[in-house]
Image (spheres, rainbow, N blue to C red):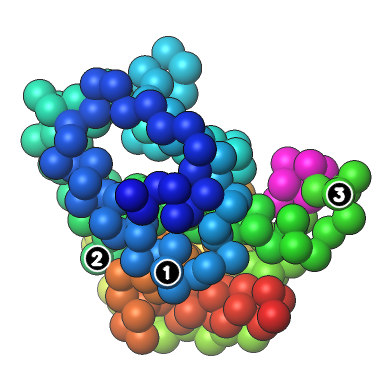
Amino acid sequence: MAKAKWGVTTCNLVGLDSETMATTFAEMDKVFATYPQLVGQLAAIQSVDSEVIGENAFMATDGETLYINSDFYATENIETLTLERKTYVQRGYFPIGTENIASTAVHELGHLLEIALIRAKIPIHEQEEFWNNCTYAEKLVDSAMNEVSLSNTEILRGFRNYETDLNNVADSFLVKIFNGLGTKTKSDIIRHSISKYANVSPSETLAEAFSDVWFNGNNANSLSRAIMQKYLSASR
Ligand SMILES: [Zn+2]
């Protein structure tokens, strides 16, 4: 069973759709095989409901347990979940090309890659602080942002995700506005070019970048690719 191979010792999937979980675990297995530093990071997989995890969360992780929301993953709700995931991608909340039902778990594994790096590189008494403050993720994201140069298409996606009421503004004019903006707004727009969710915190930027690169490879957003390059050099 894949989960034992990942180092997972406790697995409670009560109330979750078995076919969806099989698809999800198959994708997770590929990620674990590609990123062996993930093995041993996750101790448990736990089905919980919205009251525990929050009514908008499909999944979450605290770096020890992967929580899966049974209010979304119950068999009778999978159709809604599939549709919601698609809608979120269409509206720019998640990266382009991550409609896949397994992509939520891939995003969570992005968080586990962050904790794997913290556990490997940071003294144990500082690890919790690094995790809670997204310290390592922030360092990676910032250094990637300093080097990356977005294409005009990416700038436009970022701008329109950042400010949704720009449909009537011409592309060329938006690019001109972007170039004249201050650093803070520019950074927000650059992170929005991955997804709206990528702007929530540096950890979310890293997890979204990971999911983007996992599903899109060389066609992923430039910032996503730069962040993952930084991640790979940092974890050597
Ligand atoms: Zn997340």
Q: Which residue is mark 1?
A: 33
Q: Residue at x 42, y 13 (%)?
A: 51
Task: Find out if the beta carbon at label 2 lies less than 8 Å from the nearest ligand 1 atom.
Answer: no
In the rendered structure, the answer to whether residue 171 lies left or right of residue 35 reads left
Q: Magenta part mainly helix, strand or loop? A: helix
| Position of 49 relative to 58 (above/below) | above
Marks 1/2 in contact by CB < 8 Å: the verdict is no
Query: Within 10 angstroms of label 2, few (less than 14), some, or many (20 or more) residues?
Result: some
Which circle, 3 or 2, is nearer the viewer?
A: 3
Q: CA distance from mark 3 to mark 2?
A: 37 Å
Q: Position of residue 127 (x, y in %)?
A: 81, 48
Disc 3 marks a residue whose amino acid type is Ile
Q: CA distance from mark 1 to mark 3?
A: 26 Å
Question: Which residue corresponds to the image point at 74% horizontal and 57% vertical from the top-left?
Answer: 118
State the image coordinates of residue 41 (x, y, percent, origin top left).
Answer: 60, 50
What residue range appears in magenta? 128-134
SS class, disc 3:
helix
Question: Is 133 colored magenta in this rendering?
Answer: yes
Of marks 1 and 2, the one in the foreground: 1
Circle 1 residues within 10 Å: few <14, some 14–19, many ≥20:
few
- Rounded to the nearest whole Å, what is the CA distance between mark 1 and mark 2? 22 Å
Residue 36 image position (x, y, % from top left): 53, 68
The residue that disc 3 covers is 124
Q: Is residue 60 visible?
A: no
Task: State the mark number for residue 97.
Answer: 2
